[in-house]
Amino acid sequence: MAVSVGRSLHRLQRRLFSTSCAYLCIVDKNVWNDARPSVLCEKHHPALRISQSSNAKTMDRSEFEQLETWENKAAWLSAQANWIRLSAMTMTHHAKLGHTGGDLSSADILATLYLGRVLRVDPENPQWAIRDRFVMSKGHCSGAFYSTLAQRGFFSLDQLKTFMAPLSMLNGHPDKNKLAGVEANTGPLGHGLPIAVGMALAARMRNESWRVFVLVGDGELQEGSNWEAAMCAQQYNLENLTVIVDCNGIQQGDFTESTIRMEPLADRWSSFGFAVKEIDGHDHLALLSAFASLPLESGQPSCIIARTIKGKGVSFAEGKPAWHHGVPTREQLELAGKELGVEVEW
Amino acid sequence: MVSPVAVDKGESPEPQLFDCRDAYAKTLEDIAGQDSRVSVVISDSLSSAKMKDFKARFPERFVNVGIAEQNMVGVGSGLANGGMIPYLCAASCFLTARAMEQVKVDLAYSRANVRICGMSSGMAYGQLGPTHHSIEDVAWTRILPNMTVIVPADPIETEQVMRYSLDHVGPMFLRISRIPVRKVHPDNYKFVLGKAAVLREGGDLTIIANGVVVSRALDAADMLAAKGIQVRVLNMSTVKPLDRESIVRAARETHGIVTAEEALTAGGLGGAVAEVLALEHPAPMRMVGVPDTFAPTGTAEFLLDYFGISAEGIAGAALDLVRHEA
């Protein structure tokens, strides 16, 4: 037993140290030391059996800029978003845990922000002081978020295969101290907007021009802390702050409308001093155009209400509360791949 | 009724008393003058956190989030992400309790470089009742991984701790009282994180105290000396990381330990010392502090006496220990 664990460890170490992703280790080193030797083996980390030379599609990261028309850019982003969707579902399928519904509703927003080059970030220098900040307040949609970060180049696509595995850097909810590109530890709802307000205040205090974006869910807005933060953003005229609502109308247990109604959502944000724009959250041209027009009003924080469909793009998941944290079977994953036009890779 | 025994060696027979908030506020202004990253967030707590002068001097680095502690802590975490060193200054009872999940997730779990200055902690708001008492804050913050917890004893130590905090990496809880205290440290005292200060040597017993209770512990030591019991007094201002070495040495070299604090002993300094003793060097022990109850109403001085968090109470606990254990 000891011998086999030792061999596994040796093999694992060889793989870890041969990874090309120099600034990140694929396994969390910041754990209670006593726990490491007994659990750090392939038995508990099946994803690591997969070769590091994955068949995951590597996209040319300058491709977006090279596309000439906005229609072409939108079409390219649509394909990227579908890759993110299937990647998140594949992760959830293997981990047997995840939040499929929200992963699918937020994929177009995430793709536009990161791959549509809205955010000024540098994967080679994740702590670049004047980078734009993005806070994934709905941290449970980590499948889509991690897939987007990996596709943007913050870490290797192979690392996605460790999603929620023991000692993975890819927790069920994001941890900024484990993973480059993550700005805030989220998971409990209603934390992201207050943090984003603090970031926007910091940029102002430092006289720097970087911007802050935060993605919240509509159900999440039932947490009162969001409205504390919204009042603060208004008071301090934080025009460098943009709240994006992934307004998919469904929360964990039911439709938002049948739980605690959030409408009229645009009026609520307006009355809290935000300049508001409502768009189709799956329309990449509309997303690009909204992001290009920030701040929506000078001297005011902006709110983009992205009307989305929970489970978007996958017939059996669309609009179904049960798919909030549904886990696809292999057959469902293959079907989703067909519907999204993306090959299931692992 | 601060001190029944005059131990001040100065000219005045009555020792001068200080509100530690003055030292904290003045030092915070000083370090803000040195370092442009220092910023302050309050929650409508301008007077209670003594931040009027800071606001006047550094308006661009001063944020008032209104009566909204959850947002306050999140804002602090965001400011730290943006490269600032924020000090969150508000009544400890609301700042810790109301925003506990934000303190856990946005600060402790995130290892955010944020300082929580819990003002008027313990039973300083005595007459206002248990809603405004903050006897739980030491226990709540102490159990959070990554969190540093400091309870300064007098204005000299408060200033030292504030100066130290500028260079600290990670989240800190600083418990600042408004209960008047006399100086217990010499002017050249140097605070060292995680190291207890030996304020008095003695080989019979050890009293481990912090915050506003340290002066009372010194008075108790005087009373016990009059009875021929020589007491070592440690100021354990850093509750986390705890100075385990000093605790174990005290357990080895003296015959028992009395802890004294203005907080719930469960999970507080008493609990922390007991954990070390139980695991590393079991020794006879008494805990002086707030027992498992909400406090009645009354002035802070009254409540301290009521729970025996006084020179007489601490000396009494020591005598009880001697009688039953030694």
Image (spheres, coloured by chain):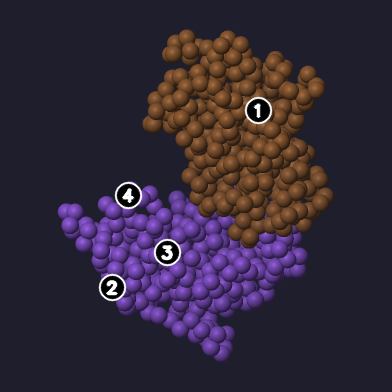
Chain colours: A purple, B brown
The answer to whether the residue labelled 2 contacts the one labelled 4, judged by CB atoms less than 8 Å apart, is: no
The circle on residue A143 is: 3
User: Is label 1 in a helix, a strand or a loop?
Assistant: helix
The residue mark sitting in front, 1 or 2, is 1
The circle on residue A51 is: 2
The chain that hosts pointer 4 is A
User: Is label 4 in a helix, a strand or a loop?
Assistant: helix
Residue for badge 4: A35
Distance between the alpha carbons at the discs numbered 2 and 4: 26 Å
The chain that hosts pointer 2 is A
The foreground one among B34 and A221 is B34
Residue for badge 1: B212
Earlier in the chain: of badge 2 and badge 3, it is 2
Residue type at the position of mark 3: Gly
Is any part of residue A176 visible from this angle?
yes
Residues beneath discs 1 and 2 located on the same chain: no
The chain that hosts pointer 1 is B
Query: Mark 1, residues whose alpha carbon is within 10 Å: few (<14), some, or many (≥20)?
Result: many
The foreground one among A30 and B325 is B325
Distance between the alpha carbons at the discs numbered 2 and 3: 21 Å
Q: Residue A26, percent across and down?
A: 38, 65
Query: Mark 4, residues whose alpha carbon is within 10 Å: few (<14), some, or many (≥20)?
Result: few
The foreground one among B60 and B8 is B8
Residue type at the position of mark 2: Ser
The residue mark sitting in front, 2 or 3, is 2
Q: Residue at x 59, y 38 (%)?
A: B150
Q: Is residue A314 left or right of residue B114?
A: left
